[in-house]
Amino acid sequence: MQLPWQSIEDGATVPLFYENRTPELQLVNPDLNADIYRLIEDADLDADQEAKLEAVLGRQYHLITRDDRLETVAQDIVRHFLGRGMLANAVGKAMVVSIDKATALRMYDKVTLHWAAETARVQKELGELSYQQRGGGMTPEQARRDLRIAELKQRLDVLTTTDMAVIVSPGQNEIQQMQALGLDIEPHRKRMNESQPGLAEKFKDTDDPLRLVFVCAMWLTGFDAPSCSTVYLDKPMRNHTLMQTIARANRVFPGKHSGVIVDYANVFASLEKALAIYGAGKDGKSPVKDKQQLVEELRKSVVNATAFCAAHKVMLTEIEATDVGSMERLSRIQDGMNALISPDPLRRDFFAHERLVSALYRAVKPDPSVLEFASRVACLTTLAEAIRAKLNPNPSDISQVMGRINGLLDESITGHEIRQSGPPALDLSKINFEALANRFKASKHKNTDLEVLKAAIRAQLGAMIQLNRTRANFAEKFEALIESYNAGSRSIEELFEELMKLSNSLNDEQERHVRENMSEEELVIFDILTRPAPELTPEERAEVKKATRALLARLKVLLVLNWRQKAAARSQLKLTIEDTLDTGLPRAYTPVLYHQKCSAVFEHVYESYPERNAGVYA
């Protein structure tokens, strides 16, 4: 039998981290029942002594289900769930495992009440901050206030959108039994039976707001929801059942560094025993680690990232020492961005450091130990987001960038002005190349200017090649230029000059359809028919243009609904291409070349016109 963690090493699962949050009213021995039975068997007890000992067997249940204890656990679940660094993405689903059906219902009710109280508190604080008078300019205090408002808005969004559900197996007379305990299971059972889609499907769906479920036995085995990253364990368990339960949190999912087991029932002793029975990982070590190890991994990754930046003359401590929102801080961030943005291998290495630090930081939250790293993590993230903003020639709304950054901040720096500073992304069709060259010569941030130009060219190339695949040679030339710079065979000034020449040629290419007196749509077919062969006279080129226009007009009529799925429609399209080109192309086309061009045109139509009145030219 393959154990849940045996595939960690090959990437099939993620590591699990253990967090003991057992409340003061704890049961120190989760194996109390087994121990008492062993005592009864080993001791020579009379009937009274045996009865007295057996009475103690119920003590474990009463301890775990005490109302004040459940209240403490419920409040902590709300605080922990909202404090995790996983709420800005899909890796935010969690399970609460209770000792029985009645306790699962009670926990749902208590969490719901504390959830509502936290919602009201956030709304109140947000209203008070929003009401405060804004100053005339951006001060450090105003920047901190804006940051706090952004954090509260994100928290409120989670509070108001998160759905919860109870998942328990049905039982006879359960409605009456629960009513006798002061609980109402009827609406939960109705939802479990009637939900469309089913609750299991909703919980597995990363876009569905069902993020927190309350269970006692169902879904603990044989149920996989890869985006579930947290299991709140409030049920004494042992051996195989315990192993299967904690495995709910170790499934691989994009953006998920690890799973977390939050232990309220003090099952660690049973966990160690189960590991001894069922074995550890391939290296002989326990697959379940104390969360302090995760903190140490975070500390190590922060040290490595800081050293990497320092090696490239970016001093994070100096950035952090400036006031939030000040021009000095923005200037230092700009300098840091320029140092780390280029060449490509350097930027990729920096992004790798930042991603690891951010993933570990999110995994450690909401442990108070993250406060030690908050400022450094925020600084790294701000630099990374600033670089991404510069590389994107069509930047998204600034609030989206702030949303990603704010998810990593507690009370730290903000990068929300970076996008508004410096030159905007370049529009190559309107660029003044002489002015750009002069600015580049005088620029302090040549790496940044170069990356903005590269990003603009890459975006323009993508759009041009989507319209006309015969332009792929431009992309090959662009990538060759970049590779030569990354390899050190071109200086930054030489690369910039070559890229400007390429930009000029791209602009000329974009206007070529005007010079050829054709539409972009017609030009693509014309290029397919004339590139790379044959050699044509001016008169023959005119014949190909005439055939192109006639062919496109005939093809448009044949693009019926779902034409790509219909054999007859595809066949009619091929025959039309062959017939039109057979009569329209000049004698320069040999039979072999003619058939090659027919196939190439059909392939172009198939890829570019997926549906009638739809496609890249619509």
Image (cartoon, rainbow, N blue to C red):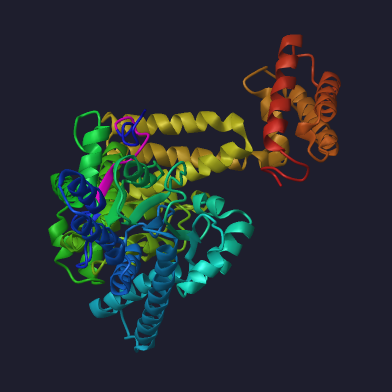
Q: Nearer the viewer, residue 56 or 82?
A: 56
Query: Residue drawn at (77%, 45%), measured in percent from left and top?
Result: 613
Q: Is residue 236 magenta?
A: no
Where residue 282 sits: x, y (%)?
24, 28
Q: How many marks?
A: 0
Residue 442 at least partly seen: no
Query: Residue drawn at (22%, 66%), measured in percent from left and top?
Result: 23
Where residue 19 sits: x, y (%)?
23, 55
Q: Nearer the viewer, residue 572 or 188?
A: 188
Q: Is residue 388 above or below residue 406?
A: above
Viewed as shown, does residue 123 lie left or right of 192?
Answer: left
Residue 192 occupies quadrant: bottom right
Viewed as shown, does residue 531 lie left or right of 522?
Answer: left
Where residue 237 sits: x, y (%)?
31, 49
Viewed as shown, does residue 101 lie left or right of 593?
Answer: left
| Residues drawn in magenta | 9-18
Q: Nearer the viewer, residue 192 or 290?
A: 192
